[in-house]
Structure formats: structure tokens, C-alpha cells
Amino acid sequence: MGLRLVAMLAVGAMRLAFDALSREGGKRPVVELLRDSFEALEAEL
């Protein structure tokens, strides 16, 4: 169960990052957006 949860959280963070990339028109690098997504996730947990 633990590994499945980690995988779901990672996929969700990637989806949010790519949604932000699309919304912003590619103004920021994907790595920065992924970092922001994972930091937000970490703050929630």
C-alpha cells in the first residue's frame, strides 16, 4: 500500500506541474514547477 500511495502522489504532482507549464505557456522550466508541486505536497503532509 505504501508504494502505491507514493506513486499516486508523484503522478499527481507531475500532473499539476505539467498543468502549470501549460497555463504559464512554458515560462518556467518543468523542473522548477515539479519542485513547487512537491514542496506544496510536502507542506500538506
Image: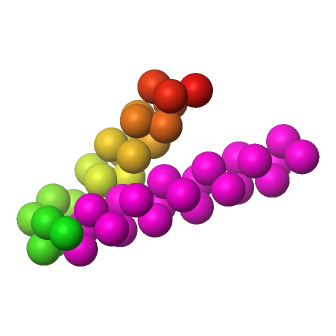
From the viewer's perspective, is residue 32 above or below residue 29?
above
**Residue shown at 23%/74% (left/top)?**
22
**Residue shown at 62%/50% (left/top)?**
9
Magenta stretch encompasses residue 38:
no
From the viewer's perspective, is residue 18 above or below residue 41?
below
The secondary structure that dominates the magenta segment is helix
* Relative image position of residue 3 (x, y in whole percent): 82, 48
Magenta residues (range): 1-22
**Residue shown at 27%/62% (left/top)?**
20
Please tell me in which quadrant of the rendered image residue 31 appears: bottom left
Please tell me in which quadrant of the rendered image residue 11 appears: bottom right
Residue 31 visible at all:
no
Please tell me in which quadrant of the rendered image residue 27 appears: bottom left
* Residue occupying the far right of the picture: 1
Question: Which quadrant is the C terminus positioned in?
Answer: top right
Horizontal side of residue 39 vs 7, given as left or right: left
Type of colouring: rainbow
From the viewer's perspective, is residue 25 above or below residue 34?
below
* Relative image position of residue 14 (x, y in whole percent): 47, 61
Horizontal side of residue 9 vs 38, given as left or right: right
**Residue shown at 27%/50% (left/top)?**
32
Horizontal side of residue 19 vs 43, given as left or right: left
Horizontal side of residue 41 vs 4, given as left or right: left
